[in-house]
Image (cartoon, grey):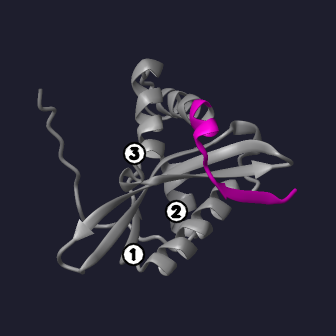
Amino acid sequence: MTVTIRNAVPNDAATIASFQLAMALETEEKELELGVVMPAVEEVFANPSRGFYLIGEIAGEVAGSLMVTYEWSDWRNSNLWYIQSVYVQEQFRGRGVFKNLYQTVIEQARVEKAGHVRLYVETDNERAQKVYESLGMKRLPYFMYDIKVD
């Protein structure tokens, strides 16, 4: 079956939010709150400087999605694009949904002159790491740090 990629539209927000709840539970055993996630997804549509979503469909059914966000690099004088919030429904995995989403991101990044496309992945998610490496992505020598500020 053919995978069709399209830009997400505001009517996709509920599906994307549900994917995020499922992904967090599956990958990190973390229960997210729809009341937090839904407005965050809607914010991307309301404020395109936050990023954009792509949708992968098979036979007209939404099979998966991802979000791209931006980071300005003064080292490169260009944006770095970050692939985030990747989710493919279980019944569609292994059918090229992510591969097609990824290839669309790369094509759009070239057009927009983004310097690099990056993503981060949970250290225990070896399946995803193998997929990313099979598409030519390289592991970087950085650790990510975080602090919650209230």
Front-lying residue, 84 or 125: 84
Q: Dot 3, crowdedness within 10 Å: few (<14), some or many (≥20)?
A: few
Nearest to viewer (mark 1 / mark 3): 1
Q: Amino acid at mark 3?
A: Glu
Q: Position of residue 20 (x, y in %)?
A: 51, 33
For marks 2 and 1, the one nearer the N-term is: 1
Name the residue rendered at 48%, 35% in the picture.
27
Query: Which range is magenta?
Result: 1-14
Earlier-in-chain disc, 3 versus 2: 3
Q: Secondary structure at mark 1?
A: loop
Residue under numbered circle 3: 122
Q: Amino acid at mark 2?
A: Tyr
Which disc, if any, is residue 72? none
Give neighbour class at mark 1: few <14, some 14-19, many 20+ (Cα, 10 Å): many
Q: Are marks 3 and 2 in contact (CB under 8 Å)?
A: no
| Tag 2 secondary structure | helix
Residue that badge 2 annotates: 132
Q: Is residue 2 magenta?
A: yes
Asked if residue 96 can be seen in this view, the reply is no
In the rendered image, the quadrant that contains the C terminus is top left
The x and y percentages for residue 143 are 22, 55
Disc number at residue 114? Answer: 1
Task: Give the answer, above or below, for where 85 lies relative to 117.
Answer: above
Residue sitting at x 12%, y 32%:
149
Quadrant containing the N terminus is: bottom right
Mark 1–mark 3 CB contact (< 8 Å): no
Identify the residue at horizontal 71%, vertical 47% (top origin). Answer: 93
Question: Please, what is the three-letter code of the amino acid marked with disc 1?
Answer: Ala
